[in-house]
Image: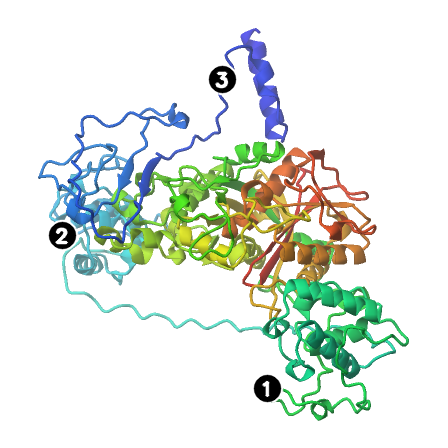
Amino acid sequence: MPAERYREACHALGELYCRGAVPDWSVLFTDDAPRIVSLPGYPFARSTHWATEGRGTPARPTAPEPVPVPSAPPAREPANQAARSAPPGKHRIRLQDPGAVAVPTATAPLGKPGNVVLIDTSEGAGQPVPPVPSLAPVPTPPAPAAVTGAGSPRAGGPGRSSRVLRDELRAGLAAVLFLSVSEVDPRRNFVELGLDSIIGVEWVKSINKAYGTSLTATRLYDYPSVMELAAHLEQQMPAGEVPSPAVSPEPAAAPVPTPTPAPVVAPRPDGPPAVRAAASGRSSRVLRDELRAGLAAVLFLSVSEVDPRRNFVELGLDSIIGVEWVKSINKAYGTSLTATRLYDYPSVMELAAHLEQQMPAGEVPSPAVSPEPAAAPVPTPAPVSLQVSEPLPVPEPEPVPEPEPVPEPEPVPEPEPESEPEPEPEPVLQAPGDTPYDVTDTAVREDRVAVVGMSGRYPDAENLRQYWTNLRDGRDSVREVPADRWDMSRYYDPRPGRKGKTYCDAMGYLQDADCFDPLFFNISPAEAEGIDPQHRLFLQEAYRAFEDAGYDPGSMSRTKCGVYLGISGNEYSFLVSGNDDAEDTVATSSSNAIAAARIAYFLNLKGPAIALDTACSSSLVALHLAQQALASGEIDVALVGGVSLYLLPGTYVRMSGARMLSARGRCRSFDQGADGFVPGEGVGAVVLKRLSDAEADHDHIHGVVLASGTNQDGKTNGITAPSANSQMELFRTVYDRHGIDAASIGYVETHGTGTTLGDAIELDALSTVYRERGVAPRACAIGSVKSNIGHTSAAAGIAGVHKVLLGLRHGLLVPSLHVETPNELLESDDCPLTVSRDLQFWEARDGHELRRAAVSSFGFSGTNAHVVLEEYRHA
C-alpha cells in the first residue's frame, strides 16, 4: 500500500476507534502481526514483596542465607516489559528471621538484585535517588540584602516574584540543613531533604521575620517543597518594603477565625407504609394459636414450650423442617407462602400477622398438622388480651403486649397504589442551595454520573480486555488453591464438618498478587514488604484508572477527588507478625483506613478518602456514596473501587465450618443444585464525574450511573440471613426515586453467590418487584460473574459493574456458567427473569432507545446495594 494511502487508512481507523468502533486489526497484517498493547504502557516494575510462611514461629537452625553478589542479578524479564528501556526482573524480596540474616559490611549492593535479604536502608545502603532537575539553573543567591518593592507582590505585583522567593528560600533551607544550595532540589519534599519539626519551626521564624508574614510551621505540611512554599508565600507577603531573610524570634501567630457551622437540616421522615385491610376470616390471635400448635408438632415440643415471640431458629426450626411446615400452612390456609418468608417474619406472632393479610376471604379449614389441641376453646377476646391464654417463658416488658401492631407489616400483594404517594421524596441528593428534590426529567439527569475511566485485575485477567475475553468465551477461572498461598493438603478434607479442615479446595485467585513497584510510588522496598498487598494492588489499579480516563495522574493534585474503597479483612498482618522490621510499620501498613488514603496521598487528592467494609456489598456501597457526594457537589471527581485477597487457610476453615462454601468447588448461581460459593480475588476501580461535567470536558464515557441506593435487612431470622422484604423495598425505592421503569432494564447482574438460601431469596425479591411492575415473562436476563471467577467479596460489586460496562460497550450478554437445571423459582409461567446461559446480542428493550442494566450486592452484614447503569451515546 502506498505510504499516503496507508496514513489515510490509519487516520480513518483511528477516527472509528475513537468513536467506539472496534476494528479487526488482524486483517491489516499477514504473517508478522504486531502485538496489541494498551497505551499508556503499564508503568510499574513487577518486583515481588511478600511475607514468607512461618513468620510467627521461631527461627529454624539453618545456615545463614548469603547476601547475593550485586553484579549478577537474575535476568528473568516479564513478557509485558519487553518494550521498557531497562526491563526489571521479578525480584522476590523475603522477610527472614532476624537471627538468620548475614548483615553486610559497609559496602552495600546497588541496583535491584533478586533473592536478596532486606537490610536497613536508613544509612544509604540502597541506590541513591538522583535529584530531580529544577525548572532552570538556580544560582546561589548573594548575601542577604534589603530588597524593596513598589507595591503589593500579590498575584504578579511588583514585589518579589515566586522565582526570587524560591531562590531565597532555597538558600535559607540549605543553611539550616548545612547543605550546599545545589543539594536542595526545590521540587523535593522537605522531609526527604532532612527537615524535621524542630528545625522547621526555627526556619519558619526566620521566614516570618524576613518577609513580615505570620506563617505557622504546620503550613510546611500543606506546601511541602520550596517551589510550593514560594508560590504560597508570594500570595501572603504584605505590600511595600520587605527585608531580606534573617533569623529572629518567632512572632505571634495570627488569630484563627472561628468558622460558623452550617445549619443542619433534618431529613424529611418517611410516612408509614400503607397496609391493606385484613381479609375476612381468622383473626391474628386465632392464627397465632394454630401456628403455634402446628410448629410445636413439627418440632416435637409441647405448645407451652413454643414462645410466639421467640425466633424460629432459637426454637430449633431449620430450613428443611421449615419448608415442610410452610407447605402444610399453604395447604391449610390456601396461601402461596414461600419458605424464605420465615426469614422476614421470624416468629409465630409476626408470621400470624402477615398471614392474616394474605389469607383469602371466607372460612378456611384448620391445619391438620396439630397433634395437640391449640387454643381453640378460647373465646375470641378483645385485641388486647394476649396475656390471658398461656404464660410465656419470657414476660413481655411493654405495658401493652398486643401482637397485632407488628413492626413491619409489608404491603406485599398491592404495593403499587400507595408506595409513593407524592413525586417528591426526601431531598437526598440536592446540592446546597438547590430547590427541594423533584422527580422530573431534569432532576434525574442532574443526579446522573458518568464512568470516565476504569481498570481492574481478576482471575486469569491482567486487565479488563482479558477480563472481557474470558467472560465472552464463558471461561471458568476457578482453580485449586495455589501452593504459594498455603499447602492445601494440610487442610483439605472432602468430608464436611471435620474440625480444622475445609471441604473446598478451589479459588479464583490473582496471579502475581505479590508484585509491586514501590519506587514508582515513592515507597521504599523495605516498607513495601510490610504493606498489605490489597493496598498495593488498589494503588496501582487506581493509577491505571486515571490513565484510562485520559488524565495525567500528576495533574490531579489539589482536586476535589474523593476515594471510596470497599475492602474487607487484613490477613496479611498475620503473615508479617513476629518480624521486628515489619512490625514497625504494621500500624499503617495493614490498616484498611490507610488503603483508600494511599492514592490520595500520592496524588495529593483533596476529597474524602473512605475505606468501608459491609462485607460482600462493600464496593457497590462505595459507588453509591460517591454518587451522592458528586450529586451534592461535595466532590467533583470520584475514584471508586474494591479489592479482595485470601491469604490464610483459616478463612477457608471458618467458612467451611459455617457451610458457606461449595463442596463441588464452583459457584452454581441459580442452579437447582447450588451448594455454596467459591472464594475469588480481584481488584477494580472506576473514575466517576457528573455527566454534565464529563460532557463539557469531552471525556470518554464508558457508561452512565442512573440510580443507586442502599438499605439494611434489620432483624431477620439470623444476623447473616438475607431478607426478601428488604431487597424488594430497595428495588422499589431506587426505581421510584429516580424514575426508572423496571421494564427498561434488560439485564441484572445479580449477587448470585450460589447458596441455596441466598439464590432463592434474591430470585423471590427480584421477580416479585419486576412482576408487579409489568415486566413480561422471561423478558429480563440475569447472570452472576461469580460463576466465572468466584465470590470476590469486597470487590464483588465493582467486578459486576465492570462486567456490565464491558457488555454495554460490546453489545453482548455473556453466559452465566454452571446452570444445568435452573432454580425452580425460574420455572413459573409468569417469572420475568431468565438466566443468560449463552452469548447473545444485547438489544434495548421495546420502547427504549438505550440499553439498561442493574447490579446488586447483598452483604452478609445485612447492608444491600442496587445500582442502575445505562449505555452512553454521543448526541
Q: Against 242, is 349 above or below?
A: below
Mark seen at residue 1:
none
* Circle 3: residue type: Pro
Given residues 580 and 99, the one toward you in this image is 99
Examine the rendering and report whether any part of residue 805 can be seen.
yes
Q: Distance between the residues labelled 2 and 1?
A: 75 Å
* Residue marked by disc 2: 176
Mark seen at residue 34:
3
* Circle 1: residue type: Val
Colouring used for the render: rainbow
Point out the residue furthest to the top here. Answer: 2
Q: Against 22, is 358 above or below?
A: below
Mark earlier in primary sequence (2, 1): 2
* Callouts 2 and 3 close, C-beta under 8 Å: no
Q: What element carries label 1?
A: loop
Q: Against 236, is 36 above or below?
A: above
Given residues 428 and 99, the one toward you in this image is 99
Q: What element carries label 2?
A: helix
Q: What element carries label 3?
A: loop
Q: Residue at x 22, y 56 (%)?
A: 242
* Residue marked by disc 1: 394
Q: How far apart are marks 1 and 3 (CA)?
A: 76 Å
Q: Distance between the residues labelled 2 and 3?
A: 56 Å
Number of numbered markers: 3
* Callouts 1 and 3 close, C-beta under 8 Å: no
Image side of residue 256 versus residue 854, left or right: left
Q: How crowded is mark 1: few (under 14 residues within 10 Å), some or many (20 or more)?
A: few
Examine the rendering and report whether any part of residue 606 can be seen.
no
